[in-house]
Amino acid sequence: MDICAVIQGTINKLTTYKEIIEKGSDKTSILAVLDELKNNDVFSKEVYDLGNENENEYKKLSFLFQTTKNNGGIYLFKFKEGTCLKTKKNIKELYSMKKASEKENGGKSLSEINNVLDTQYLYIGKNNENIVNRIKNHLQTTDSNKTYAMNLGLFENKEIRDHLELIIYFLEETADYPEKFILSLLKKELHENYKPMIGSPRT
C-alpha cells in the first residue's frame, strides 16, 4: 500500500466523520477546515539516502539540519529496497543489545522495539512543531538521557544507517487546520498499516 494513499485515506476518513466530530467537544470543532484539505497540497515530500556511499545525500541532509524550517510533519525511516531479512534481524539484535546496555548503564533512552522483522520500515514518527530537531535526535544522539529516540549516532553507519532512507512529509506552512489532531491520526494509521520494527504506536 502506498504511503500517500494511506495519508489521503486518513484525510478522507476524517472528512467523512467531520459532522460527527463537530457535534462533539469544543476541542474537535475546529475540524471544519478539513474540507479544504481535499483541494490543497498539505504536505511537501523530501527523501534522503542515509548510506555513506553518497556524499551528496549527506550534504543535502546537513543543509536540512541548518535550516530554520520548524513546521511539523510525518517522517519514516525506510529500509532500502533489497534489504534482506537477515540484515533486518541483525539490526534488530544490535539495537536490542545497545538498548539493554544503555538502560543498564543509565545512558540514552532508546525507543522501544516491536516484535516484527518482515517490515519495510525501521521507524515511523511525527512531530507537531519542529520535525527537523526530532529527526536529529534519531540520527545523532539526544542531549538528554530521558528523551526517547533511536539515537543512531551510537552506532556505526554501516550497522544501521547505510541500510536506510529517510522520507519526510513536511506540513506546508500555509496549511490551516488542526495539525496536532491530523498528525496524530496519520501516525497511528501509518503505524498500524506498516508495523515498523522500532517505535511506539502512541501518538
Image (cartoon, rainbow, N blue to C red):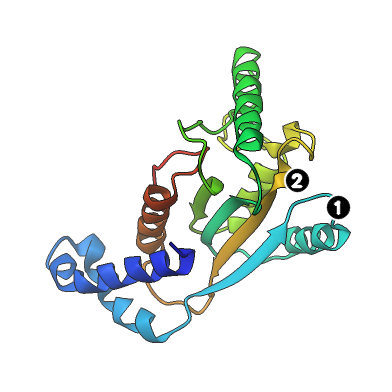
Task: Check if mark 2's residue and mark 1's residue have beta carbons within 8 Å.
Answer: yes
Q: Is residue 24 left or right of residue 64?
A: left
The image position of residue 88, as x and y in percent, is 61, 36
Q: CA distance from mark 2 to mark 1?
A: 8 Å
Identify the element where label 2 is drawn: helix
Report which residue position mark 1 lands on.
53
Q: Is residue 19 above or below residue 114?
A: below
Q: Is residue 93 left or right of residue 26?
A: right
In this orientation, does residue 107 appear?
no
Q: Nearer the viewer, residue 199 or 1?
A: 1
Identify the disc placed on residue 162: 2
Is disc 2 surrounded by few (<14), some (14 to 19) or many (20+) residues within 10 Å?
some
Q: Earlier in the sequence, mark 2 or mark 1?
A: 1
Q: Nearer the viewer, residue 85 or 150?
A: 85
Q: Nearer the viewer, residue 129 or 81?
A: 81
The image position of residue 63, as x and y in percent, is 79, 63
Give the residue displayed 79% in from the left and 34% down from the top. Answer: 156
